[in-house]
Image (cartoon, coloured by chain):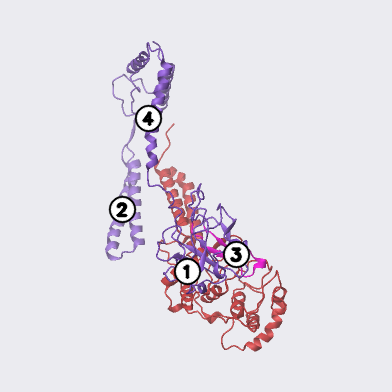
Amino acid sequence: MRRALRRLRLPAAIVCGGLALANLAAPGPAPVAAQTQAGALLRPGDDRAALAAKGERVFQDTCSSCHGGDARGIEGRGPSLRGVGELAADFYLRTNRMPLDDPEDQPSRHPSSPLTREEKRQVTAYVGTFGGPAIPDPDPGAARVADGRRLFTDSCAGCHQVVARGGQVPRARIPDLEDATALDVAEAVDIGPFLMPRFRTLDDDEVDAIARYVAATHDPEDRGGWGIGHIGPIPEGMVTWLLAAFALVLTIRIIGERTPR
Amino acid sequence: MTEPPRSRRLRDTLLGAALVRLLRRLPASEPPREPGVPPPDIERELPSTRGAERTVLVALLGTVVAAAGFIVLYVALPDTQLLGLCLGLAFVCLAVGSIVAGKKVVPQETTIEEREELGDRETQEEVVGIVRRGGEGVSRRGMLLGAAGAAGAAVGAAAIVPAASLGPRVDARLHRSPWRAGRRVVDADGAPLTVADIEIGGFRTGFPEGATRDELGSPLILVKLEPGEVELPAEQQVGMPSGILGFSKICPHAGCAVSMYRHPLYEPTTPKPALVCPCHYSTFDVRRGGELIFGPAGRALPRLPLRVNAEDELVADGDYLDAYGPSWSGVRQERPAP
């Protein structure tokens, strides 16, 4: 019996290691931040004139090297910001996609920014003085997840995947939407950032439904117990077969024996 | 008559192998047995101990408890996870009990199964002799053998030829698309798509009105380009009203749905607009009428010429300009003239 146990040590260690790895791969529950315009840099009642006056100086320091001193853009470095409105400024500054280290980089969500929130507010107000769309006010609370899933499948899942975990397109990363708030979704649909098409033909209710669905993907119900990255049935099947194979090898090791010599 | 060497070699090999096995299995002290006497059990152990029996008992009781738990849960709290856990536990306990019982409780016997010599030597020699004698007195053996081979080949060919009539003829159906001049383009809900529905930098999926959507030729992907953005010779700039281009949504590589559209927000620092197939990343330049710029597809994404009717709705202006659907050898050769 003891010999048998000693023989089992290696396979047991492999199985335990496999389980530990699978456990690491399973992400913890993501916080659901179903914020609407609450998180926006500017609210309807803000004193835009005062903010914009300060924002011009921040803009000259931080943004003008690519977007130009007059916000008309610099050919080959950055686009004109005239007419993009508070909407685009809020999207890029609030998610820390801007400022960008290198104008050739793909703007992507960043955990930190060289600008303080107050400075971002000022720049947003300044960009807003050139006209353009206001910050949207999505209200996903009333929308149905089922509608959102249908719309998301039609318009978004081709790139972002139906589980909203992103992917690749030639020469660009498609971001996962794990941190995307309803406001982010509404703004991105309007802007079409980087290589994303824009979807201005979607009406407000449809955008709300999509935002509702995106929020639902943040913390999906894992019927099987493990999410395994929420990247679909193929990795789930692979993990299952891997564990099953270990279990079978272990069983064979226990009950089988070598021909005595 | 001497035995053919091959069969002798085979026999010697088999005998040798059997001998080696016997020698390895038999303890050296085993006395020679008389023929006809059944072999005694070579090893017989009675390994059963109280501990092993207790283990089996515990495992079997565990099976009972887990299976009973399944039944109780099934009635009281039908949670699939717990049900699966109970049933799995029951099977694991049963397996443990069976394995331990099989190895540690019941008597362990090691015996050798006696095996007869393979084949009957006399019969074999007889058959070999008959075959030999069959060719006696035949003078034109080569010719007869050749004729027999030809006859076999002819019968085989005759059996294969009817395979040509298996299944319906494919003919032109792979080229027939539901698109006809004047057929309206509708969205997934059946509502006609108008010029205003397609925005620059966006894309839509369209279907033929009143036709099946299951055919490979049905789905369209529609994009709109800025005025003057199209990079095609003037004579090819047809069927694109207001800069709206319609393409087959089926990738000409493996038939996936071309569902990705990349459209640069600021082109100087980004790649140009293109339709991308998510399966193998075939990338099609929309400005050049769907020309392939990257990926494994062998040809351009076929374009459907469009026009606009009096209500500003998009309608087809004929069939695809090239064969649609995944490529195979001769995808273009059999294309009927439009």
Q: What type is the residue that disc 2 sits on?
A: Thr
**Regarding mark 2 in the picture, which secondary structure is present there?**
helix
Q: In the drawing, does residue B215 fall left or right of residue A120?
A: left
Magenta span contains residue B259? yes
| Disc on res. A152 | 1
Q: Secondary structure at mark 3?
A: loop
Front label number (3 vs 2):
3
Which one is nearer the viewer's eye here, B145 or B315?
B315
Residue placed under numbered mark 2 in the picture:
B63
Using the image, determine if residue B195 lies above or below residue A171: below
- Crowding at dot 3, Cα within 10 Å, few <14 / some 14-19 / many 20+, comes out as many
The magenta segment: B256-278
Tell me the residue at 53%/77% (across/down). Answer: A183
Precedes in sequence: disc 3 or disc 2: 2
Report helix, strand or loop for mark 4: helix
State the CA–CA distance, disc 2 to disc 4: 62 Å
Distance, label 1 to label 2, CA atoms, is 47 Å
Q: Look at label 1 and name its amino acid.
A: Phe
Locate the C terminus of chain A by quadrant.
top left
Kindly check if marks 3 and 2 are in contact, taking CB atoms under 8 A apart as contact.
no
Q: Earlier in the sequence, mark 4 or mark 3?
A: 4
Disc nearest the viewer among 1 and 3: 3
Image quadrant occupied by the N terminus of chain A: top left
Q: Distance between the Cα atoms at labels 3 and 2?
A: 63 Å
Residue at (58% x, 54% y) in the render: B295
User: Disc 4 vs disc 3: which is toward the camera?
Assistant: 4
Image coordinates for residue B214, horizontal then vertical, percent: 41, 59
Q: Which chain is rendered purple in the image?
A: B
Same chain assignment for discs 1 and 2? no
Q: Which residue is mark 3?
A: B273
The chain letter for the residue carrying disc 3 is B
Mark 2 or mark 4, earlier in chain? 2
